[in-house]
Image: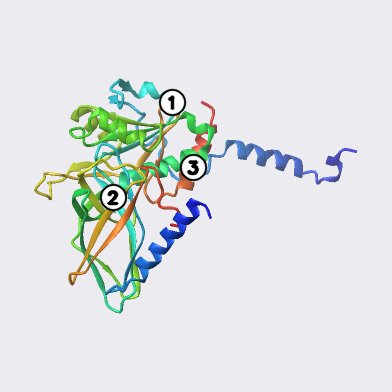
Amino acid sequence: MNLRALLAGAMLAIGVCASAAPASPPIQVQHAWIRWLPARLPVAGYAVIVNDGDGLLRLTGASSPDYAMVMLHHSRLAQGDSTMEMVDHLDIPAHGSAELAPGGYHLMLMHATRAIEPGDKVPVILQFAGGTSLQVDFSVLPANASGPPVSD
Amino acid sequence: MPLARFLPRWLLPACAALLLAACAAQPQWQLNDVKGHLPDLKFQMTNDLGQPVTAATYHGKLVLLYFGYTHCPDVCPLTLVHLHTVLQKLGKPADDVRILFVTVDPVRDTVPVLHQYVTAFDPRIVGLTGTQDAIAQLAKRYRAFYQRETPKTASGDYEVTHSSAIYIFDRQGRARLLATPGDSNDAILHDLKILAEQPT
C-alpha cells in the first residue's frame, strides 16, 4: 500500500468517525463550497443542509474565524432586476433538505481575516435555532467553478 | 438517366422555392430579438487595464454587455460563469466575443479590482468603468437600471440593485439580442453560433 492510499484510507476513517458520532439533532451538510473571489471581496458560500430529524430545523446564522462577518442572504430577481436581501433564517423541513445555491439563498462572507486562495478550506459554524451549532469545512473553489465535483 | 424524369413536374420548382425561402428566412432566435429596438453600442469608458476605450474598440467583435459590480458575490459571478461556460462550448468563434462587464459601483470598483475580478472568470471578459455620468448614460441608453442601496450593517457595506439582462451586439455594434436570467446557457449558445456565422 502506498502512502497516498494509506492517507486516503485514514481520511476515509476520519470521515466515517465524524458522521458516525452521535449528533443531536441529526444534521448533515453536503457539498459545502465557497466561490473564491480576488481582492478580498465578499464571497458566497453554498451547501445542502439535510435534516434527518423529526422536527423543523431553522438555520439562524453563521460565523467563521476566517471572516469578520457572515450573513444569510437571498438573491432575488424581480422584474429583471437583481437584488440581494438579508434574511434572518432558513427553514429545513423534517426529513428534508434546504439548498444554499447560486442565485438563491447563500451565506455572504465579508472582510476576510487572512488571505484565502482556491483549494483552501474555510471553517464555518452554522447556528441553528435552539442553540445547536455545527462546524463545517467549506471548500474554496475557483471563481469560475460551477460547483463542487459531483462525487464530493 | 436524369432523376428529374421520374419526379412530378411541380416538385422541382417547389423545392427551389423552399430553398429560397429558407435562405431568406430570419434565423430562429431563442433569445429576444431586439434588432431595431435598441440603439447601437456607444460609450466612452476606461477598461480594466486603465486604457480609454469606446464602442469602436470592439468593432469586429460580438459584444455581450452586462451591468454588475464586484461586491456582488452571488448573481454577478453566476452570470459570468454561465457566459464563461457558453464561450467554452462555442469554441474557436469565442475568440471573437468580448463580454463587457460595466460596473455600476465605480467608487469601490477601481481599475485593479475590476481587472482581478473579471480575469478570475474568463480572459474574454473586459471590465469597464467611467465617470458616474458615463455609466448612467450607458445604462439609460439600454434602459438598464441600478440603484445603490442604504447600508444595512454598521460597517457601511452596501449592495447595488441592478438590471440582470445581457445585451448582445453584432460585429458592427448593432443591438441584436437580449438575454435575461430565464434564458438557458443553451439558448445563448444557440444564438451566438448563428450570430458568429452571419456575414459582416
Disc 3 target residue:
B189
Q: Dot 3 falls on which chain?
A: B
Residue under label 1, please give it: B172
Residue A107: horizontal and vertical position, in percent?
A: 26, 54
* Vertical arrangement, residue A69 with respect to residue B15, above or below: below
Q: Which residue is mark 2?
A: A44
Q: Amino acid at mark 3?
A: Leu
| B71 and B63: which is toward the camera | B71
- Which residue reaches farthest left? B154
- Residue at mark 3 shares a chain with residue at mark 2: no
Place of residue A152 in the rendered image (x, y in percent of width and height, measured from the top left): 43, 57
**Position of residue B46 measured from the top left corner of the image (x, y, whole percent):** 28, 24
Residue A93 placement (x, y as % from top left): 30, 73
Q: Tag 2, which secondary structure?
A: strand
Q: Alpha carbon of mark 1 to alpha carbon of mark 3: how far? A: 20 Å
Q: Would you say A2 lies left or right of A80 here?
A: right
Above or below, A38 relative to A94: above
Is B181 placed left or right of B25 in the picture? Answer: left
Q: Amino acid at mark 2?
A: Ala
